[in-house]
Structures are given as structure tokens and as C-alpha cells.
Amino acid sequence: MTIKLFNTMSRKMEDFQPLVPGKVGFYSCGPTVYHYTHIGNLRSFVLADLLKRMFIENGYDVYNVMNITDVGHLTSDDDDSGEDKMEKGAARENKSVWDVAKFYTDEFLRDSADLNLLPPSARPRATEYINEQIDLVQKLVDLGYTYQIPGDGIYYDTSKFASYGALTGGAMAGNRAGARVEFNDAKRNPTDFALWKFSPTDKKRQMEWDSPWGVGFPGWHIECSAMSMALLGPHFDIHTGGVDLSRIHHANEIAQSEPITGAPWVKYWVHSEFLVDKSGEKMSKSSGEFLTLSVLKNKGYDPMAYRYMLLMGHYQSQLAFSWDGLDAAANGYKNMVRRVADIISDKQPGAIDSEVFDAWHNKILGAVSDNLKTAEALVAVQELLKNSDVNAATKISLIDFIDRLLGLRLVESAKKQLTLENIAVPAEIQALADQRAAAKAARDWAAADALRAQIDAAGWNVIDTKDGAKIIKKG
């Protein structure tokens, strides 16, 4: 099946052609583990997961790398100023940097499991690849791409790299005035960036290493180049991340990699757009207030409802988050699970019809293979589940495939739903439900709502159907 992806570098749709037939290597920028990962960050990780699942279902052998940034990411993001985010997190929580890194890495891994993200083939930490980063900086020094700012660090001279900024259509390096929020007068060009930062002389950092240029720590950008080269080789198929990384972080990765590896270092660049709030602002951690997956869970939302919401959009389009939108996604997901539960409960499933299976399989996989059109795939899934001409056995086999492709845990959730439905309803809960039914019949909506709230607080759901109310134990 033809796979199409939008390549940020060429700014057009391209047919995917792997560097090695039958194999895919890709790198995804992972979290900086100084704080919780917010739900906007998680969108880019779901993108990477969808890519991996899509390639696997198309028969590819996939090797994907997602890093953990546990050093070198400064608070400015756009320039090389401010504190190291890891050191700042340690000061905020009065813990060691290592403890902070472990805690927030574990939290990220829990979020990843809750969202059903397939584990990457490798998950390297920046602090595990310090020697590789130093070696890469040394090669750039030897090639004449760097200069030293005394008391600050080793910097990359972007004027030496003619195609700097090509990823987002930028001009020649050094000619982009205003590219940074602030301009360090010691830099030769506004776009120059740190490869190695010197430790401050007035205090000792918790994370610092010896190098040919003095004691210090790597810049944020160099880690991704060093780890991807170590694990994927000098050239690989795909690099993913959030769109906010394309202008500077990924531009810097290209600039520091291609003098060594040769162009193109990466064949396809795939970026996810922002998750925005109701005001249109992207979700970020800078305000100190942000939504996490744990917040959604504590409010009673299944993480699969959030994944479903993301899949109802397209990764290249901004997605507005609202509680109403999440409620709609949760209801859509519950309805889909309900249909799957009915299908797997069928006592006469029949035999799998291979011709029908192939037709639906190719329709759904084709949508996802066409630049990850997951919303189109979900529409096809809904059509399949409602289609009375497809027998249960064929549907069940297709649902297994859909779970592998979209990662929505439909079968798992449906089986859980059936288990909960078989739990006997206590007499006191049934009495409340009967009172609620009487209140509804009398059009006493306030009393009906109050009774529903009592049932809910006791750990049960009341679902109104055409055949009357169903009472189901909460999961």
C-alpha cells in the first residue's frame, strides 16, 4: 500500500520510500523531564505512536528512537540563556537533579502506558550519551564550524551552513535579525547556538562533565544529533516532533549534523500542530498552570477518550481543547465500545469472510496510510460497526486490526464493559434508580438529577436507553 506523508522540508506530500527496503528508522524528540508532561506535549507522542503502528500494519520492520532530555535544555527555549530546566526543577522541589529526572521520567512512562503508546525501540537519556555529544562537538570544531565565547561556551556559527533554516523556508544564517527574542552581543550571528556550555564559576552544577574545552554540559540541540547517529546511523528515514521545534531546535539539529553526515541527514520531517486552549493559545508550561493526563483521569475521563479526541483531528491542524469537546469524544468512544461489546457477545458470529475483511481492512489502513487521516479512518470504523451485512466474526477480526492500528483498546474496554454489566445491582441502588424513574415520569427533573447524583456517588452509572435505564458498575 502506498504511504503518503507531508514532509516539512519540501512542504509537500510525498510517497514514502524507505532508505532500506522493508525497514523504517525514525527519531522522535521526547520529553524534558523537569516537570509533568502536559496534554499538548502528548499530542506529538501520539503522532509518533500512530506512525509506528501504521508502518507495522503495512509490513515494515520499524526501529524508532525517542530520547529523554535530562540535561542541557535551558529555560529560554529560543536562545541560550536562562537556567537549565533540570537544575531549575531540582531547586523548585528541593531534590537532586537525578531524582527529579527519575520521577518525571516515570510519570511520562505512566502517561505513555495510559495512552497505549507502543514503547520505542530505544529510549536513550541525554546523560547516557555525553561522550558521543562531546565527540560530535569536537568534529564540528575540527571542521571549523564553531567558535568560543569566553566564560559562556562553544557556539555553532550558522553563517558557515548555507542552508540554515531551510526546514521552515528560512533565509541564510546570520541574516535573520529578530530570530531570537534577545541577542547575545557575543554571538557572531543571532541564530548561532550553544553546543557546549561552561559551568558557572560562582556555583557548582549538579550535572557537569569534563570536556576538551572545560567543565560544563551539552547544549540541548546536540543531544538529538548524537543519539540519533549512535542508534540510527548517519542517515535515517523520519524525524518527528511538535511544530514548535521545527524553527529552531530541528534547524539546529540539521546544521550540526549535515556537515558530518552529508545531506540529507533525515529524509522526511513530520511535525504535529499545537493543542490550543479556547483562547487560541498553545498549551505550555511557562505559566506554571497546565493540564496533565492525570488531571483528566482524576475528573473521570478514560485516557482513551483523549486519544480518541486527538484521532478525530488531523495532526497537521491545530486542535482546540475544551471540556465540551472532551465530553463529546468520551461519548463517542463509549458508543464505539458499546457496539464492540455487542459484537463480541454475538452467540452466532459465523465465519470470517476474507473478501469482506480485506475490503474494510484496506479502506481503514488506506486512510491512515494517507498522511495519517485518522478521522477518516474512524468514520469508516463507525460504518463497519453499524453494518449489518458484515458478520460478527469478520467484525471481530477487523476490530483486532483496528486496535493494533489506532491503539484505542476497543476489545479490552468492551470486555471490561461486559464484566461490569454482569455485576449484580445492589437493592439500595436499584431503589434509587426506581425513584429516579418515577421522578422522570412525573417530570420532576430536579429530583431525577439529584437521584442520579446519588447513584453516581455510590459508584454506579445510569444509562438511559429506549428500553429503560441500565445500571452499570463504574470501572
Image (cartoon, helix red, strand yellow):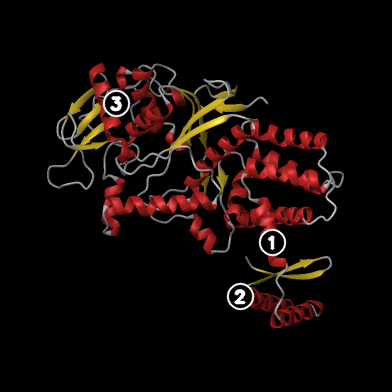
Residue tagged 1? 417
Cα separation, mark 2 vs mark 1, equals: 19 Å
The residue identified by callout 3 is: 136
The answer to whether any part of residue 6 appears in the image is yes
Specify which label sits upstream in the sequence, 3 or 2. 3
Tell which residue pokes out farthest to the right in this image: 389
User: Label 2, on which residue?
Assistant: 457
Foreground residue, 272 or 139? 139
Q: Quarter of the image for the N terminus: give it.
A: top right
Amino acid identity at mark 1: Gln
Task: Quote the CA–CA distance across marks 1 and 3.
Answer: 53 Å
Camera-nearest label, 2 or 1: 1
Tell me where residue 263 appears, x and y as whole percent. 42, 17
At numbered mark 3, what does the secondary structure look like: helix, strand or loop? helix
* Residue with the most extreme front position: 351
At 44% from the left and 32% from the top, the residue drawn is: 246
